[in-house]
Image (cartoon, grey):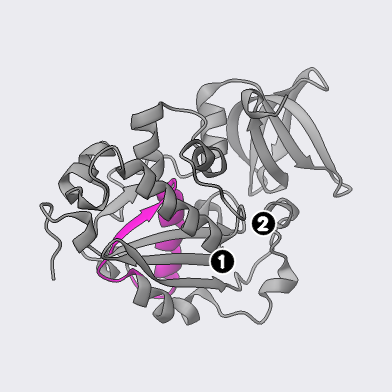
Amino acid sequence: MPISLLQPLREIPFAFIDTETTGASSDYGHRVIELGIVRVEDGRKVAEYQQLIDPQRHIGPGITALTGISRQMVEGQPTFTAQLPGAMELMKGAVLVGHNVRFDLSFLTREFRGAGLHIADAFPNAHVMDTVRLARRRFGRGGNGLQRLAPRLGVQPVTAHRALADAQTTHLVFEKLMEPLAGWHTSLADALIAQGGPMGVMPITSREPVLPLELEEALEQRKPVMMEYLDAREQRTQRLIDPISIRRFQGELTLVAHCHLRDAQRTFKIERIVQLTRLEDIPK
C-alpha cells in the first residue's frame, strides 16, 4: 500500500538502518561488513536484524580498531548478496532512516548493484529520512555525530560503531527529534519538512557528501581536531591536526592535514584513522 504524506508516522513502517564498512567511500571499492536494521511499526519496534558480511576484500586496521570487526570475524559469513533476502524483509515497504544516511545508502547502492539489482527498483518511491539533517535543523552544523548527539537528547548508546547498536540508537534519537512536533502522531509531510525536504534512495546530485560524518564535519568546519591514528607499527597515536582536503593516492583515500606535532602538512591514510574528535568534545 502506498504511503501518504498525510499519514501520521505511527501508521507507517520504518526501517532504521546502519552499515559498517571496510573504508570511507564505496567509490573506491570499499564494501559493507555488517548490516543492522530495526523495524518499527505502529511506533513500536517489531523486529531487528544484525548480520556480519564477508566483503571479500581487505579490512583495514583502522576499521578493526574502530568497530572491533576483523577479517577473521567475517570469514565464513554470508556475502551481501546471500544475506539480502533476509535484510529485505525488514526494509521493504518502509521509510528508510539512517544517521548520515547518504553514507549508508551509497554503500547499499553499490552492494545492490553487485547483487544484480538497482536499489531504486528494490525500494520504489521509498521515502528516506536522515537524523543528521533533523539534528542540524535543530542544533546547527557540527557536533552531530551519533555518539555525541544521542546523550544531548537523553539517549545513552550502549555500543558504538556496530551496525545494530547504531541502528537502535538512531531509532531512539529519531523519536527524540520528533518530540517537539507530535512524536509518532506527526504527519510524514511535517517530518519531511523538519529535515529540510524529501529524500529518495538515490541522491539528487552526485555532489552530495558521502563521507563518514565526523570526517565530513572536520573538513567543513576547518577547525583543529584530535585524530586517533594507527601508525605503521599498528600503535595508536594521537595527533592534533587541521584537516585540509581528501585526495586519492595510489588507489587509496588520504586525508591532507596540517600536523601540529610535525608543524607541517602531512597525509594520513583514511583506513588508519580510528577517530576524529573536536577539541570542545574532549573531556577536560
Residue drawn at x 50%, y 46% is 155
Which class describes the residues within 10 Å of circle 1: few (<14), some (14-19), or many (20+)? many
List the single residue furthest toward the top.
263
User: Is residue 111 magenta-colored?
Assistant: yes
How far separated are the C-alphas under marks 1 and 2? 10 Å
Magenta stretch: give its range.
91-117
Relative to residue 206, is residue 283 drawn left or right?
right
| Badge 1 amino acid | Glu
Comes first in the chain, label 1 or label 2: 1
Residue drawn at x 29%, y 39% is 195
Residue tagged 1 = 34
Q: How many marks?
A: 2
Q: Quadrant of the N terminus?
A: bottom left
Q: Confirm or deny contact between disc 1 and disc 2 (CB under 8 A).
A: yes
Residue tagged 2 = 67
Q: Nearer the viewer, residue 129 or 267?
A: 129
Residue drawn at x 60%, y 20% is 223
Relative to residue 228, is residue 135 drawn left or right?
left
| Badge 2 amino acid | Thr
Tell me the SS state at disc 1: strand
Q: Name the spot of residue 265 as percent of width and height, x first.
A: 73, 23
Is the residue 48 above or below the residue 125 in the image? below
Q: Is residue 6 visible?
A: yes
Quadrant position of residue 115: bottom left
